[in-house]
Amino acid sequence: MKFPGKRKTKHYFPVSERGRVSFDDRIDGERIYIVGIDQLLVDVEAHVDDLFLKATGIPKGQSVLLDDATVDRVYRQLKADGRVVGEFAGGAVGNTLHNYSVLADDHSHLLGCITSQITVGDYAFHYVRNTSSRVNLSYLYPTGGPLGRAICFVTPDGERSFGISRGIMNDLPASAVPEPLITGAAALVLTTYLLRDERTPIFGAAMRAIELANRTAVPVVLSLGTEPLVREKRDFFIDVIRQASICIVAGNLDEVGALTQQSDPLLAGQAALELCDLCLLTRDQHGLYLCGHVDEALRRETRDQIHSKSIAEYNRFEYSRAMARRDCRSPIKIYSHINPYLGGPSVIRNTNGAGDSALAALLHDIAANIHHRLASPTSPKHKARYLTYSSIHQICKYANRVSYEVLRRNSPRLWHSLPEREDSLEQSYWDA
């Protein structure tokens, strides 16, 4: 991607195009990268009917934990019935880092547990094979046992339900979190799944990583995971977000709504900004919202049509670049919304991972801002300490376009390169 700088569609897709600016070169001895912790698992997507879910004991639309034996039995039955349509490397943070590395064509680092003995064809092998080579896996913690598995049951109405086998995914000890890697990152990406059970080793690893990130003001990003989990542990997550200085909260309307107890997307985003600096909220066929803060003296008014919904003239200052609330003398809340790119794909092949891909686009913009600040510290773009390189309006366009690529493919991850090009769509869509 030609980033930073003026952007057009051809610089976004295909990502294999030459001439993109890489973060690979060190600036003043520093390298720009994202780091994340995840419960490593393999996603198995299967098309089933409601009767199959009922017979298996999986509540429709929810995520439940299953023992390894049950997952093995269900998996064999699905394969025998020809219901399995895909097997992919998964995990919310793993998906986000992979997509970030594809978009930025640059490094990210993944922490988690992996099988110590990998053989050709096993789940760990597929995980490594289907992860971008730009995602550094050298910090993974090897241990005995099977990799985690998540079977995604897709019913004819498009609803997704999950049956998850833990395997070794929770076994990452706090001692395996390298301090220099965390404190030198552009952002730390976590998910609420890591904080589900305080008795697991990975909970301690996540809390240690947050502590290290806070020491050097590394932005901490929390993906909300799933609505039932957020509802169940709402008070706990609110305390974590506040006490751990979580910078960015990302989730769909159900998840952010469960956290804020607001059913309207703008009001949910507004309430989330009382807890964090920036909120990315996706809303299926209704597009996505980005809500943030900016100093009142640095706000920039939109040149597009002004809209009013539950918040009057909510997008008036959407051309502003987001800032951390602590860096604002007089913080004001800013909002932007975008409908699905081209109305969405004519055929939606997969909705799993669309939110993760939108978050990857946001992280790329944040990393680009750090890169540009180091490369051109006297640039007018850095007269204040901004969190993003682009306006929240521009980031919505970018995140929306990336989500489109996932929605039209049968995979929660972008391909390692995207060879298809929509020349007729280039024009000036990305100028802003």
Image (cartoon, grey):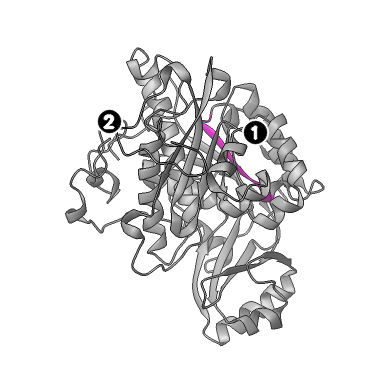
Choose between 127 and 191: the one closer to the eye: 191
Disc on the earlier residue, 2 or 1:
2
Q: Are the two marked residues, 2 and 1, in contact with CB atoms closer than 8 angstroms?
A: no
Residue found 51% across the figure and 32% down from its top? 292
Tell me residue 264's x, y (percent): 57, 49
Residue 69 got which mark? none
Is residue 347 visible in this depiction of the protein? yes
Is residue 134 visible in this depiction of the protein? no
Above/below status of 44 relative to 222: below
- The residue that disc 2 covers is 5
Front disc: 2 or 1: 1
- The residue that disc 1 covers is 275
Residue stretch in magenta: 185-193
Work out which quarter of the rendered image holds the N terminus and state it: top left
Q: Secondary structure at mark 1?
A: loop
**50 lies left or right of 285:** right
**162 lies left or right of 195:** left
Mark 2: which amino acid?
Gly
Callout 2 environment at 10 Å: few (<14), some (14 to 19), or many (20+)? few
Q: Secondary structure at mark 2?
A: loop
User: Which residue occupies the extreme right position in the image?
Assistant: 199
Mark 1: which amino acid?
Leu
Magenta span contains residue 263:
no
Tell me residue 377's x, y (percent): 37, 15
Above/below status of 314 relative to 116: above
Q: In which quadrant of the rendered view does residue 419 lie?
A: bottom left
Callout 1 environment at 10 Å: few (<14), some (14 to 19), or many (20+)? many
